[in-house]
């Protein structure tokens, strides 16, 4: 990351707004054991799991072509069923659970453990462009999340928000837009099923650290890490870098290791000596 050209030393303040945005936690065995609401079928843990592309995953019939082979070799963990917004709410306020229910019933018959996707921007949503995150219709998005999580309560514990972003996001959309969708999903999902897992760093919700490395004329230097206290909300991290060599003759150059966190914004301010 580069800032404005500087020809003399300065003291710099970095301010970051960051939030946790991660998918399914690990290890699943510990989560299952710690959570009394976890169905019994989830408590037999395996390190192996699988998923399928959209061609082989839309329906129970599609799954039946390849799931039995997985069951035969002991693979029982599946990334997701087809639970996208447009699939379960094809028209505003009209809910269709038939295909989703068939998928869950089939996977349960194979003793499968599966998660769900919170994803989609249906064609009837005119507030957002097709192929983009529904940031202009968070009310509708939250309603969808609430309904699908409520419907699947007791059958799906783990929910993943979107698939491999920036896939399926608008050309000009940013991590901050994704954060809006995730935070709205988290609030709606937890209200519908307090025992579900949507946004979580690890089993025990342990503190994590955000690290900053910056370039000076004497090499790469590490600032004191920022301890992230929890993953329930956005946090602001601040560094004051008194190393005058941080500002070299070209730019502010620094990198941050944010782990499973998304950095919403970065502000670099030159401080008066």
Image (cartoon, grey):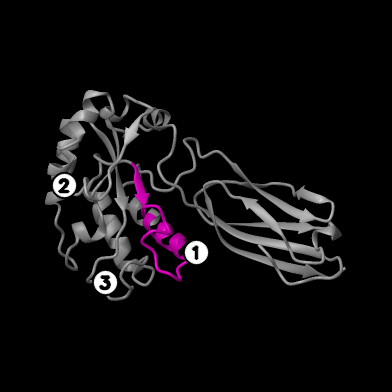
What is the span of residues highlighted in magenta in the rendered image? 158-185
Q: Is residue 111 in view from this perspective? A: no
Q: Which residue in the protein does label 2 denote?
A: 59
Mark 3 or mark 1: name the one nearer the start of the chain.
3
Real-space Cα distance between discs 3 and 1?
A: 21 Å
**How much space separates mark 2 and mark 1, taking CA atoms?**
33 Å
Q: Is residue 14 above or below residue 61?
A: below
Horizontal arrangement in the rendering, residue 156 relative to residue 27 (left or right): left
Quadrant (top left/top right/bottom left/bottom right) for the C terminus:
bottom right
Q: Is mark 1 on a helix, strand or loop?
A: helix
Which secondary structure, mark 2? loop
Q: Does the magenta stretch include residue 140?
A: no
Residue 60 drawn at (x, y percent): 14, 43
Rendering coords of residue 229 (x, y %): 59, 46
The residue tagged 3 is: 125
Asked whether residue 177 is drawn in magenta, I would say yes
Residue at 73% over, 56% down? 239
Give x and y (percent) for residue 147: 24, 55
User: How many numbered marks does the figure carry?
Assistant: 3
Identify residue for label 1. Answer: 176
């Amino acid at each position: 990351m580069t800032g404005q050209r500087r020809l003399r030393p300065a003291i710099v303040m970095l301010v970051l707004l960051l939030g946790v945005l991660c998918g399914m936690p690990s290890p699943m065995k510990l989560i299952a054991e710690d959570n009394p609401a976890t169905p019994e079928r989830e408590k037999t843990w395996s390190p192996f799991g699988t998923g399928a592309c959209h061609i082989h995953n839309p329906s129970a019939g599609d799954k039946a072509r390849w799931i039995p082979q997985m069951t035969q070799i002991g693979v029982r963990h599946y990334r997701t069923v087809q639970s996208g917004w447009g699939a379960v709410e094809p028209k505003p306020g009209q809910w269709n659970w038939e295909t989703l229910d068939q998928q869950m019933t089939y996977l349960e018959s194979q003793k499968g453990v599966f998660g769900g996707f919170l994803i989609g921007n249906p064609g009837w949503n005119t507030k957002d462009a097709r192929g983009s995150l529904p940031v202009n219709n968070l009310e509708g998005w939250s309603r969808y999340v609430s309904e699908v999580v409520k419907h699947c309560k007791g059958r799906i514990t783990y929910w993943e928000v979107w698939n491999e972003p920036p896939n399926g996001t608008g050309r000009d959309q940013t991590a901050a837009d994704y954060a809006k969708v995730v935070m709205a999903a988290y609030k709606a999902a937890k209200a519908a099923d307090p025992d579900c897992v949507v946004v979580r760093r690890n089993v025990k919700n342990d503190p994590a650290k955000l690290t900053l490395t910056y370039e000076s004329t004497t090499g790469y230097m590490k600032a004191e890490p920022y301890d992230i206290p929890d993953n329930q909300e956005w946090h602001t991290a601040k560094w004051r870098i008194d190393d005058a060599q941080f500002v070299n003759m070209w730019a502010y150059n620094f990198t941050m290791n944010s782990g499973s966190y998304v950095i919403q914004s970065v502000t670099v301010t030159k401080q008066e000596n």
